[in-house]
Image (tube, grey):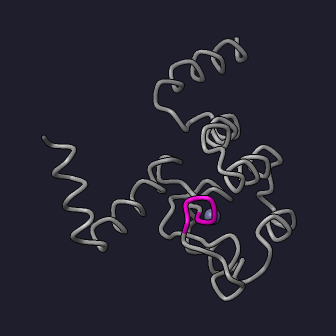
Amino acid sequence: MHINDAVFLEDLCPKFRFRQWRKSIHRFTGKSCIYCGKPSESIDHVLPRCQGGLSTTENCVPACLSCNGDKSDENALYWYRKQKFYDPRRAMAIRAWLEGDLRLAIRLLQWANPNFRDNDKGYEAAKSKYKAA
Ligand SMILES: [Zn+2]
C-alpha cells in the first residue's frame, strides 16, 4: 500500500513532512506571492512567530522575499493595505486563507490574477482580441 508507506515515512522523518508541507503551501497559489503575485520564494508567518504565530497552514502564506522582508512583524492585512499593489480581492483571499478556507482563498486569487491558471490564457487572449476589434 503506497498510502500507508507514505504516512509511515512522514512519521519517521518530520523534516520530510515539513518540506512536503512547505511545497504544498506554494502549490496552492501556483508558486506566487499571495500579496503581490510575484514568484513566491518564502513562507510568511501572517502572525509573526515572535507574537506567538504558529507554523500552521492557516498562518503561513506563500510570499516573495521582498514582501516577506518588508512586512516584517507588522499585521499582514494592515501592512498590505498600504502597498501600491493592494488589491481588495487579494485582501479577501488572505482573510479567507487565515480562516482556513483555502478553496475560497484560491478562487479569489484566481480572480485577482487571470494568468493564475494556464487554461484561462486562451480565454483571456480571445477576449483582448475581441476588445481590440
Ligand atoms: Zn510579494
What are the residue bounds of the magenta stretch? 56-60
Main secondary structure of the magenta stretch: helix
Q: Which residue occupies 70% across, 57% down?
A: 98
Compared with residue 133, is residue 117 higher up or lower down, i.e. above or below?
A: below
Residue 123 x, y percent position in the rendering: 57, 18
Which of 17/133 is in front? 17
Q: In which quarter of the image is ligand 1?
A: bottom right
The x, y position of residue 91, in whole percent, is 78, 52
- Residue 132 image-quadrant placement: top right
Residue 28 horizontal/vertical position (percent):
50, 47
The vertical placement of 71 against 60, above or below, is below
Quarter the C terminus occupies: top right
Number of residue marks: 0
Q: Does the magenta stretch include residue 126?
A: no
Identify which residue, 35 or 13, lies in the foreground: 13
> Residue 11 appears at what percent x and percent y?
26, 65
